[in-house]
Image (cartoon, helix red, strand yellow):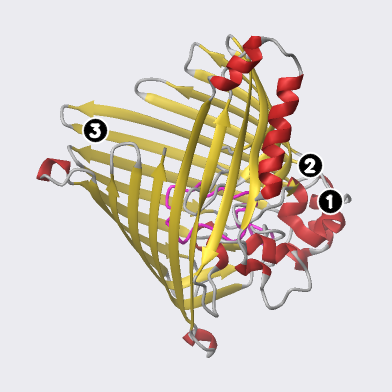
Amino acid sequence: MKHIILSVLILSSALLASTRVNTISAAFSKGKVSANIKYYYIQTDKDNSYTNTKNTSAYANTVGGQLHFDSASLYGFRAGVTFMTTNPFLLGSSVDASIIGRDNGVRIEGNPSGTVARKGFSVLGEAYLAYDYQNTGVYIGREVIHTPLIDAKAVRLLPSAVEGASAHYTLAEKTKVIFSYYTGFKQRTSSVFTNIIEHALGDKTKAITGSDSGSLEMLSFTHQANAYSLKAYDYYAENFLNSVYLDGSYKLNLSDVKVAFSGQYINQKSIGNADTYFRNNPSVAGGKISVNAIGLKAATTIKSSKFILAYSKVLKENNKHDSLVLAWDGTPLYTNMITSNDLFSSNYGKSLGSDSIYIGNSQGIKFAYNQKYDNFGLKGFSTTLSYLDISNSRFNKDQNDYNIVLQYKAPKAFVLQLKGIWVQNNTAASADGTISQLKLLSQYRVIANYKF
């Protein structure tokens, strides 16, 4: 924690030293400080009957959160930092490290006992300098972002973050174009920003791409109107992967009833050195990366009740790596569930693995029902029930997910969530496409988050 605080002081001092006029002091004295403190309990039980191995149970408790400072704007310039920390306690012999330091443990070789993954960490997750002028802005440094294929992954204790630079242009406050250049990525269970390509491919980075490191460029276009919205993203990961994401939605209001329809399309292809490598070494990833996926969603809101029906399909490509590659915490399909969301393919070096609805040839159908109870005198309380069926000719049995979330949300400040997750025939695919299934995965979470 000491080195994080020191980093914050150094950055603040450097900015102050750039000029000593009173307006610089005002930029900091009138800046905004925000924070959240989060308690997280997780327990994961696995029935390993299919492999005739011992059933397992692991849990973890941790307290952590974020402290953020954003300066006031001075001639269009502003600066900010975000301190992030996770501090586990009362750990047993079997630890679920997915809210602590799982990625730290994966990254460090020669640690079979997993002792590093039992430890908490602190990190300067954001440290940036931004400039805004009229409809144009530039952002340099570390940043938490939310996009379909690079995301903060809010379902865990801390968010993921990227390192690099971006520029945006806004037209008529409804259309926004962003170009980003990223070189680093910090996974949510890591204290380290690693090269963004190395994070995806680990110790195979040089063999696959021809270099020990690389960059990712992202170009995005978003348009938000009253009745509809459009999104288009292109992610170009140097000598590795090009990913295109398209999304459109239309909303219709009919008195007390709101209806929304959405559609999405994802295309991924290996590029450059990686394309040649996968073609010449098909045993590594099952062949060249060639992925096409579609999704449809319909949502209906009637007063305090919301119903969702979603469908997704990852198309089959013979002799190709046809599972979605989600190296940077993206979970883009509409059918995504709390657990069946490729949570661990974004760990260091694990991007060519996949699970559930993201595996090539998987078809998913999801039903969800959310109910708020404000009109029944229980202000702030809500429940969400979700069910997902995943079918795939490569699976021995369909995967079925059942989720329940009980939530209490106080105005602005406090949220308490109780989550129960049951996954029958939980399915994963290795990099070369080999399928494995778990008879039953059960998971329970208690999350309390206070913002101020």
Residue holding disc 2: 238
Judge left or right: residue 52 versus residue 401.
Answer: right
- Residue type beneath disc 1: Thr
Residue holding disc 1: 209
Tag 1 and tag 2, C-beta contact below 8 Å: yes
Residue 303 to residue 367: above or below: above
The one nearer the camera, 425 or 6, is 6
The picture places residue 22, in percent across and down from the top left corner, at: 64, 10
Sequence-earlier tag: 1 or 2? 1
Q: Residue at x 62, y 59 (%)?
A: 345
Sequence-earlier tag: 3 or 1? 1
Judge left or right: residue 335 versus residue 33.
Answer: left
Q: Split into 4 quadrants, where in the image is the C terminus?
A: top left
Cα separation, mark 1 vs mark 2, equals 8 Å
Bounds of the magenta span?
Answer: 317-346
Q: Identify the element where label 1 is drawn.
A: helix
Residue 404 to residue 379: above or below: below
Furthest residue toward right = 210
- Residue type beneath disc 3: Lys
Q: Residue at x 54, y 48 (%)?
A: 293
Could one spot residue 353 in this view of the protein?
Answer: no
What type of secondary structure mainly makes up the magenta span? loop
The quadrant in which residue 409 appears is: top left
The picture places residue 80, in percent across and down from the top left corner, at: 62, 29
